Image (cartoon, rainbow, N blue to C red):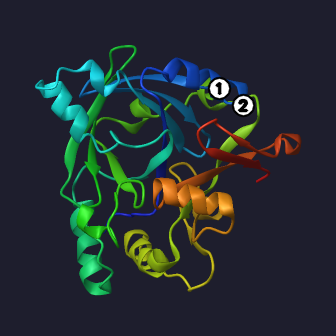
Amino acid sequence: MTTPPTNTLDHIVHLSPPGSLKEISAKWKDLGFNVVQGGKHADGLTENALVAFEDGSYIELISFTNPITHYHPDSPSRRAREKHPWGKKEPGYIDFALLGNNGEPSIAATINKRAEEDESGVKYEDEVNGGRTRTDGEILKWLITAPSQSSAIGGGDIRGRLPFFCGDLTPRNLRVPHEKTDITHPNTAVGIAFVRILTSHDQFDGLRRQYGTILHASSTSSEEVEFSLKTPAVDSTAAPSLFLRPPQSESEKEWLKTRGAGLYEVGVKVQDSSRVAETSTPYGRIITLSP
């Protein structure tokens, strides 16, 4: 059986406060992005909108539909909200997904076998079902392969520190906007240029090795490690990079202290060089740069 690729960027998750999806969508539109409404997820706890690109990747704007206090303390919905992997995350970039498959072969089994050989200590849990209903009523289904909490070097939340995988059971083009009108942006954005992960100095080397296992790629030890990714609609020569490094400024140190290791900023390619800038979403850093 062919080994599945595990280095294709699928999407980036950006969280905003409960019930604020409409407002955050407007903020992204103000930054020059076209925003397509998504729908509610299968658990009914979250809803999303999508910023999709020509390269096949997208940024998911997500928010919980209600604050946790909305649910009765003893209700199943309250317990589900409390156990949600993003339930305690602060607004901003909270996670990102690599493209998975339909479970045959298992992404988790593939990575876990590599990890045994690499002795990197990373582990992924078995695939679980997920899905959402679009605003037009279309039901989408997928498989999620998430990192195990046992992979967390030095403790802390593993979600967002390592990527999860999203593999489609229904056609991907139902999940990801792809029409020309959906992926054309006023700021001329065409795709993801990079994602940058911050981690502490003492966890840096261990996390570098874990990413090597996950992405099935080698890297050299340096102050900032770069891994080349692929995206669903382009070959690797036009693909984004994943950067991993410790903080380099006081603001980055404070960010890491507050949030823990994870996705710090995202770079987006724009065709119009006059649109090159560093800005905020306002909950996360976003860099627009020429391809």
Q: What SS does tag 1 mark?
A: helix
| Amino acid identity at mark 1 | Lys
| Near-viewer residue (244 or 34) | 244
The residue lying toward the viewer, choosing from 198 and 288, is 198
Question: Rounded to the nearest whole Å, what is the CA distance between mark 1 and mark 2?
Answer: 7 Å
The quarter in which the N terminus is drawn is bottom left
Badge 1 crowding class, 10 Å Cα cut-off, few under 14, some 14 to 19, many 20 or more, is: some
Residue 31 badge = 2
Is 250 situated above or below 11?
below
Local packing at callout 2 (Cα closer than 10 Å; few below 14, some 14-19, many 20+) is some
Which residue lies at the image location 16% right of the left edge and 33% below the top edge? Answer: 79
Q: Amino acid at mark 2?
A: Leu
Single out the residue that lies furthest toward the right: 274
Which part of the image, by quadrant, shows the C terminus? bottom right
Place residue 88 in its image quadrant.
Answer: top left
Above or below, 165 relative to 56:
below
Which mark, residue 27?
A: 1
Question: Picture coordinates of residue 72 (x, y %)?
Answer: 17, 20
Q: Secondary structure at mark 2?
A: loop
Query: Residue, x 53% and y 60% (percent of image)?
Result: 256
In the picture provided, is 101 more to the left or to the right than 33? left
Q: Residue at x 33, y 15 (%)?
A: 137
Question: x%, y% of residue 161?
Answer: 42, 60
For residue 224, what is the image quadrant? bottom right
